[in-house]
Amino acid sequence: MTKLLLLLGALILSSVGYVRSDASDHRYKEGDIVPLYANKVGPFHNPSETYRYFDLPFCVPEGVKEKKEALGEVLNGDRLVSAPYKLNFREEKDSEVYCKKKLSKEEVRKFRQAVEKDYYFQMYYDDLPIWGFIGKVDKEIKSDPSEYKYFLYKHIEFEILYNNDRVIEISARMDPHSLVDLTEDKEVDAEFMYTVKWKETETPFEKRMDKYSMSSSLPHHLEIHWFSIINSCVTVLLLTGFLATILMRVLKNDFTKYAQDEEAADDLEETGWKYIHGDVFRFPTRNSLFAASLGSGTQLFTLTIFIFMLALVGVFYPYNRGALFTALVVIYALTSGIAGYTSASFYCQLEGKSWVRNLLLTGCLFCGPLLLTFCFLNTVAITYTATAALPFGTIVVIVLIWTLVTSPLLVLGGIAGKNSKAEFQAPCRTTKYPREIPPLPWYRSAVPQMAMAGFLPFSAIYIELYYIFASVWGHRIYTIYSILFIVFIILIIVTAFITVALTYFQLAAEDHQWWWRSFLCGGSTGLFIYAYCLYYYYARSDMSGFMQTSFFFGYMACICYGFFLMLGTVGFRAALFFVRHIYRSIKCE
């Protein structure tokens, strides 16, 4: 078993690119060619809307070569090609012309539209990222957009730091005085140049990525993160205090009351949660869907734990291109057996007979909506000719992973779950006919209860959510995974506690249909996160356009749905543990 786990860990680490290229690959002699790749261009405020670098009418050098990319890089929208600049090791250049070009009216119009939308470019030099804007808009305090002037930068200045035979850092600055006027639709002569300057530094090669990691660890950022944690901890303490003082006192009184009732007389009418002991373990309706939801939620919880483990050991260092996407695909495929086992075993405990149909439902419950969303968004990306559109070969690879890894493991897990022969452990016997649920006030119905259940967990994480959104849907770097993991643990605890509290109040009101309610209440935080998406999009970001809007709300819907399944599973498991405990503590006829 230990060897199997080690093999699984090695497979995951190698698949996400944790084994970095050997240091000797980054050693150069003076005059050696250092790889420089142009990646993509796109509107700065629309991170999903990116295009190939040479989709803009830049000078295309002879013999452009495309870099072979890993699965995660393709999923990330990276399309690296050899750049037109030659930045040989320790060779300085001053205003060297690499291209003279006469821009046609159509090319001028294309560049002007790009400048108007704040297009930026991204390159990689020896695996170090470079950014820059392709032009600027001169507004000169003019209110009428028709009077704005548009300029294209034609001179880029590279400054490269090195330590002995290693490249340590690179920055690019656009010369603000070397411009091409794009304001009018007319042919323009452009002379593109670049300057290269080399400087020695004492920074060791092993620490060259630290400047990117430390950007999210600045003191004022850390203060906000710690404030978020303190806020969350206060929420947890208040909630646990509430449960300890109120709920436990009420339970103690209940236990005392029921014990006295049993000793006093047998003909006293039972009230409260003991009154429904014959119905509380009655299996839920749509048991196949319920078991499939638990299976999918358990798999997503396991996936999240694995991702945090990889993040905490340093796999997702900044600009390890596509590592997160590769990890998500690989780990999701390898953990599908957990979904199959959990779903099938619980479905059989609920006395279900069609375990094959249950297994198919488990496999499609999360992947189905994700597939439909992907098909729509990939069609949008193809229409826009954006790099987010996956090539046919990549789609084939994903289909093969799902067919050859995910599905077989799901089936094997399902067979193991079916053959586990586990029986549902119910402390009380279930009566033949269900009791009628008494009329309840409106605030005890499902929707108000879900609103109450989702608010507290969401309030514990909403501060950290902004930084995650700014990283995923922006250009901010997020590397404080330890703090994020603490917030995740707090989220799990608060979700479990609030679900237990609401389940008790539901049972005390003699409402025995708690199975689905506990799942819905636990997962309701996912709905709050999606509501936060609306706020973030319209109030905190400058995203615009149909493609960016559809990508943001489409993929966030899938992520929030995943959170719904995962936290719903956490809520139900906590509620089930609590209900078993309290009914085991009393004598049930």
Image: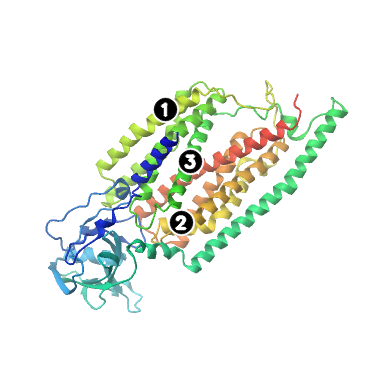
Under tag 1, what secondary structure? helix
**Residue carrying label 3:** 302
Q: Amino acid at mark 3?
A: Thr
Does the rendering let one see residue 478?
Answer: yes
The residue lying at 46 percent from left, 48 percent from top is 309
Q: Amino acid at mark 2?
A: Ile
Q: Position of residue 253 (x, y in %)?
A: 80, 40
Residue nearer the viewer, 321 or 472: 321
Numbered marks: total: 3
- 62 with respect to 571 (left or right): left
**In front of the other: label 3 or label 2?**
3
534 to 378, vertically: above or below = below
**Residue carrying label 1:** 411
Corner quadrant of residue 579? top right
The residue lying at 34 percent from left, 77 percent from top is 142
Under tag 2, what secondary structure? helix
Query: Closer to the N terminus: mark 3 or mark 2?
Result: 3
Find residue 468 and name its label: 2
The residue lying at 66 percent from left, 39 percent from top is 503
Residue nearer the viewer, 149 or 536: 536
The crowding category of the residue bearing disc 1, from other C-alpha atoms within 10 Å (few below 14, some 14 to 19, many at least 20), is many
**In front of the other: label 1 or label 2?**
1
